[in-house]
Image (cartoon, rainbow, N blue to C red):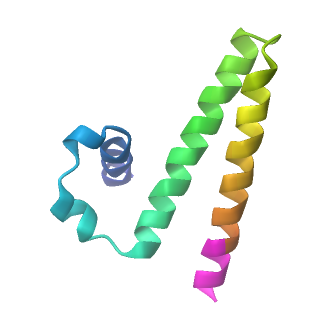
Amino acid sequence: MAEKIDLVSNFINADSIRTKQVKDLSSFDKLLIAKDVLAMMIDAKQNQIQDEPKESIWKEQQSQLYKALSLMDCEEESWRK
């Protein structure tokens, strides 16, 4: 789990990405990491929604993130078959 968190951190902090480390990952691993990043973004939007409940933009953005995550779930499912 710690390794996965480090990889997600590298994706978020693009300045610190070591391209060799990212290139060595399989496409499936990259998909799983991207899903983890989206899940973190969804959680962050939930915090924004709670902090600023009158701002409808946060709910709209969260909805878009959920849609992207749903597409990635479908892609993951097709790769597992």
- Taking the image as shown, residue 19 lies to the left or right of residue 59, namely left
Work out whether 46 lies above or below 15: above
Nearer to the camera, 44 or 54: 54
| Residue located at (65% from left, 82% from top) | 78
> Is residue 52 one of those drawn in magenta?
no
- Taking the image as shown, residue 61 lies to the left or right of residue 19, namely right
What secondary structure is the stretch in magenta mostly built from? helix
Image quarter hosting the C terminus = bottom right
| Residue located at (17% from left, 53% from top) | 18
How many marks on residues? 0
The image quadrant of residue 50 is top right
Q: At which x and y percent is residue 32?
A: 50, 62
| Residue located at (67% from left, 54% from top) | 68
The extreme bottom residue here reads 81
Q: At which x and y percent is residue 21?
A: 20, 61
| Residue located at (49% from left, 55% from top) | 34
Q: At which x and y percent is residue 59?
A: 78, 29
Q: At which x and y percent is residue 70?
A: 72, 59
The image quadrant of residue 57 is top right
Work out whether 13 lies above or below 7: above
Work out whether 31 lies above or below 48: below
In the image, which residues are magenta? 75-81
